[in-house]
Image: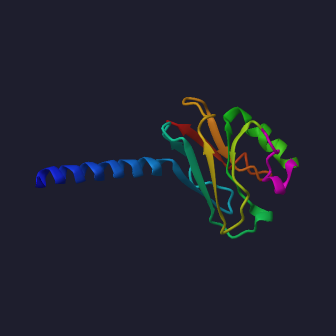
Amino acid sequence: MKTSLSITLLSVGTFLFSHAASANECELSIEANDMMQFSKKSLSAPSSCKEISVTLKHTGKLPVTTMGHNWVLSKAADVQAIATDGMSAGANNSYVKPDDSRVLAVSKVIGGGGQTTVTFSTEQLKQGDNYKFFCSFPGHFAIMQGTFTLS
């Protein structure tokens, strides 16, 4: 009886731990600073994630109007066009053209000390496709970008 109870508790504990670990794999974080740098050059999440949350933390001190940053996800081939179109979209639209179908996820623009989270569905992502994340604040995308992989 005691052995059976121990095995049951161990099984439940293992299930809960593995479930929590997989949920954490779907929650990513990245930082940006006043030197126009992301803290990571690549991010990845398992294809088993139905949704992915990315938290962006601005570790700098400059205000949003001077050194704002956001996190945008798109196919690699679309980055430059999205960033160019975003300049005319303005700050109120997080420097992303409204309803741009090329944009897979976009956070709000934050200034120094700020933090924001964007959550998006993985339905439109395909394993093996080339994705990039970048900052669409004017002039930032060429330097502030990295690869995103669904593994």
The image quadrant of residue 62 is bottom right
For the residue pair 48 and 134, the one nearer the viewer reads as: 48
Nearer to me, 71 or 40: 71
Classify residue 42 as left or right of residue 64: left
**94 lies above or below 47:** below
Residue 38 x/y as whole percent:
62, 54
Residue at 48% over, 38% down: 48
Residue 120 appears in the picture as rendered? yes
Residue 27 part of the magenta segment? no
Q: Position of residue 64 (x, y in %)?
A: 76, 64
Residue 55 position within the rendered picture, expressed as x and y whole percent measured from the top left? 59, 56
Would residue 20 be found to the left or right of residue 138 on screen? left
- Residue furthest to the front in view is 1
Q: Give the vertical position of 33 relative to 79 (above or below).
A: below
Q: In which image quadrant can residue 70 be found?
A: bottom right
Q: Main secondary structure of the magenta part?
A: loop
Residue 41 is at least partly visible in this image: no
Where is residue 57, by image quadrant?
bottom right
108 up-or-down from 73: above or below? below
Identify the residue shown where x is 18% and y is 53%.
5
Residue drawn at (80%, 64%) of the image: 65
- Residue 11 in the image: state x and y as whole percent: 26, 48
The boundaries of the magenta stretch are 89-100
Residue 90 on the magenta segment: yes
- For the image shown, how many numbered marks are present on the structure? 0
- Apparent side of residue 67 relative to residue 27 in the rendered image (left or right): right
